[in-house]
Amino acid sequence: MNANSSRLAENYREIVERIAAAAKRAGRTPAEITLVAVTKYAHWSWVTGLLSLGGRFDLGEARPQQLVERAALVGPGHQVCWHLIGHLQRNKARKVLPVAGWIHSVDSLKLLADIDRLASEMNLRPRVLLEVNVSGEASKDGFSAAGLEANWEQVQNCTHLSVEGLMTMAPVEAAGDAARPTFAALRQLRDRLVTCSPVEVRLPQLSMGMTSDFEAAIEEGATFVRIGSALWDGLEVPGEPPT
Ligand SMILES: *Cc1c(COP(=O)(O)O)cnc(C)c1O
């Protein structure tokens, strides 16, 4: 084992343990929470290092193009489910749909309708989450909570995809516990949408929590945590001297 692979194994084990501990504190089981390893900053050798730890992995990319390219690089012996976690331009959807197991970042009715139409045409049934800008920051993509409630009927008219839940990001300055109100608000919005729907809907998935705040997110009900930096911390880029 080289230095990178033992460091990576250690980082990974530590995150899995922290997820389990947070779940326990919240009276939940770790199996309810899926770690999405965010690979957007990761050197490809780090990603293959992760896969060689063995088992099935959920990997998240922020850019559609990189997701499609990297998905094609995964060897046949590996079980990977790809998650798109960043903004999807409408003209990239056709390429991404066959490759992504989950799309966390559906941030407008327009995009949702486009995905619905493409899914019908391509005979797919994509699993999507609706991205909500809970904190209302101008710099962020996503539905407003009020906008989503107001347009819920239109969401339900999209029948060729499966809306599985909601996704959010806490304000950048709100690390750790400070992110908790954002996560609680996403959960409460989900509960309201489920209750107010005239037909039965289930929105079991809540994608929330990153390196700086995933434990708070789990305590508030996250089912997907999207973790990058903590996983790759301390790894070296091959061929470059250590800094
Ligand atoms: C990059 C990114 C993450 C991971 O962030 P870290 O702080 O590196 O864990 C999670 N979610 C989204 C949407 C991202 O773009």
Image (tube, helix red, strand yellow):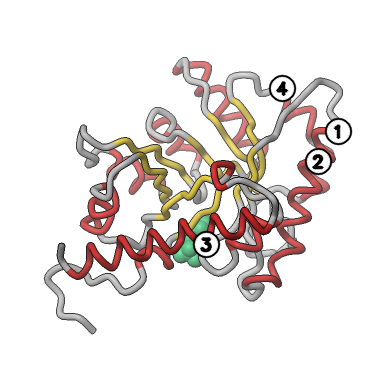
Q: Quadrant of residue 107?
A: top right
Secondary structure category for the residue under label 2: helix
Identify residue type, mark 1. Answer: Thr
Q: Where does label 1 land, which residue?
A: 195
Residue at 66 percent of width and 63 percent of height: 216
> Residue 129 location, x and y as percent?
61, 39
Q: CA distance from mark 4 to mark 1?
A: 17 Å
Q: Amino acid at mark 2?
A: Asp
Residue topped by disc 3? 18
Specify which label sits upstream in the sequence, 4 or 1.
4
Where disc 4 sits, the SS reads: loop
Q: Is residue 208 left or right of residue 121?
A: right
**Of callouts 4 and 2, which one flags the residue occurring earlier in the amino acid sequence?**
4
Cα separation between marks 1 and 3: 32 Å
Residue lying farthest to the bottom in this orientation: 243
Which of pointers 4 and 2 indicates the residue nearer the eye? 2
Helix, strand or loop at mark 1 = helix
Q: Is residue 141 placed above or below 238 in the rendered structure?
A: above
Q: Secondary structure at mark 3?
A: helix
Return the residue nearer the eye: 64 or 102.
102
**Disc 4 to disc 3, C-alpha distance:** 39 Å
Residue visible at 50% across and 36% down? Answer: 102
Task: Give the image location of residue 101, x and y in percent.
Answer: 45, 33
| Quarter of the image that includes the N terminus | bottom left
Q: Which residue is mark 4?
A: 157
Nearer the observer, disc 1 or disc 3?
3
- For the C terminus, the quadrant is bottom left
